[in-house]
Image: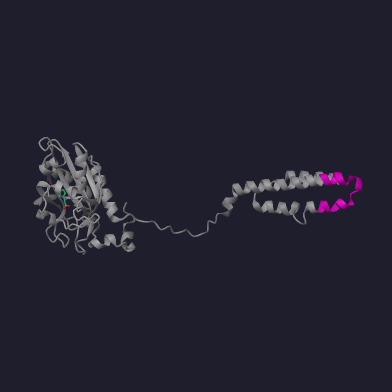
Amino acid sequence: MKERIEAVKSNIAGIKISSSAELESYRIEFLGSKGKMKELFGELKNVPNEEKKEIGQLLNDLRQFAQSKYDEVKEQLESSDASIEKLDLSRPEEYIALGARHPLSLVRSEIIEIFSRIGYNVSEGPEIEDDWHNFSALNFPPEHPARDMQDTFFIQKGNNPKEEFALRTHTSSVQVRVMENQKPPIRTISPGRVYRNEAISARAHCFFHQVEGLYIDKDVSFADLKQTLLYFAKEMFGEKAKIRLRPSYFPFTEPSAEVDVSCTICNSKGCNVCKYTGWLEILGCGMVDPNVLEASGIDSKAYSGFAFGMGVERITQLKYRVNDLRLYSENDVRFLGQFKSAF
Ligand code: PHE
């Protein structure tokens, strides 16, 4: 009996197991209900009484030896290649639905990117503004008809009609805050949402997005403004883009201009988007009025500057041919999904 136990032990020690199938046949051969261990334990009854204790002990050791080999190999297989065996390479690929960035976010990022390359930083401010930052500091006197240019939503604070706030009608308000808090030279753009009380249609909405720019330093001229805007137009619409400036009026700039870019859709030949003029209006601009500099504590004799402001919806419309403003805020995935590959 002792020899048989020894033989089984060296048999077990010599077995090499390298897969879970081999491990299973090992288990059946030695530890299974009809296996070697069962057989040897069954023979214990034929052993003479005086040897029973010793043989029983040897058998127990042997069973433990067989079991620990099984446990060890099992653990090894599970932690390594066993996982590869479980990988089902015939399984069809799973479809992962990727989101898309909103077209306005794409274009806003692009505008920021273009201006950051020529040294502009980004400034932000509150959407609920006081009269000073949205109007008065920008040279809109009280009761001035120019306030009507920007149909304003007002908010009353508590029950006091005197404590009135406005939803900002432009992000020029942020520029006032920058001028109040920083010393020139200032080179900043202010992206953000603005509100105007307009009837919603394909061409107008009660909220939209702007990026306004401000540059203040010694000896800033109108030529600097023009060159900056030409650079922007070429970066945004391509090397062939041209700009033209038309005289205009804003309370906070003097002189003021509106800027058109050559129609990228028909190459200035005339189409229904540019209304057969070859030009598309993209922004307003001008030299900052000395009154505005002074209102924010900047010496208008030492410094001059220019400002410009554009609508992100408008630039997006021209870049992606979006012909209805309402699409931007309806969250229709058929619209939003079209911008998946645009980064
Ligand atoms: N704030 C103007 C608007 O909202 C745009 C503008 C900005 C015009 C700066 C001139 C200079 O319409």
Q: Residue at x 72, y 52 (%)?
A: 27
In this view, the residue in front, 270 or 318, is 318
Residue 228 position within the rendered picture, expressed as x and y whole percent measured from the top left: 17, 43
Q: How many marks?
A: 0
Q: Residue at x 26, y 50 (%)?
A: 108
Q: Is residue 248 part of the magenta span, yes or no?
A: no
Vertical position of residue 36 compared to residue 221: above or below: below
Residue 9 position within the rendered picture, expressed as x and y whole percent measured from the top left: 78, 44
In the shown orientation, is residue 243 left or right of residue 5?
Answer: left
Q: Residue at x 25, y 57 (%)?
A: 320
In this view, the residue in front, 80 or 55, is 55
Residue 270 position within the rendered picture, expressed as x and y whole percent measured from the top left: 14, 60
Residue 129 in view: yes
Q: Residue at x 29, y 55 (%)?
A: 103
Residue 240 in view: no
Corner quadrant of residue 149: bottom left
In the shown orientation, is residue 106 left or right of residue 216?
Answer: right
Q: Is residue 43 part of the magenta span, yes or no?
A: yes
Residue 305 position within the rendered picture, expressed as x and y whole percent measured from the top left: 14, 41
Give, as a single range, the part of the protein colored magenta.
39-57
Q: Tell me, what colour scheme is on the image?
A: one colour
**What predominant SS class does the magenta segment belong to?**
helix
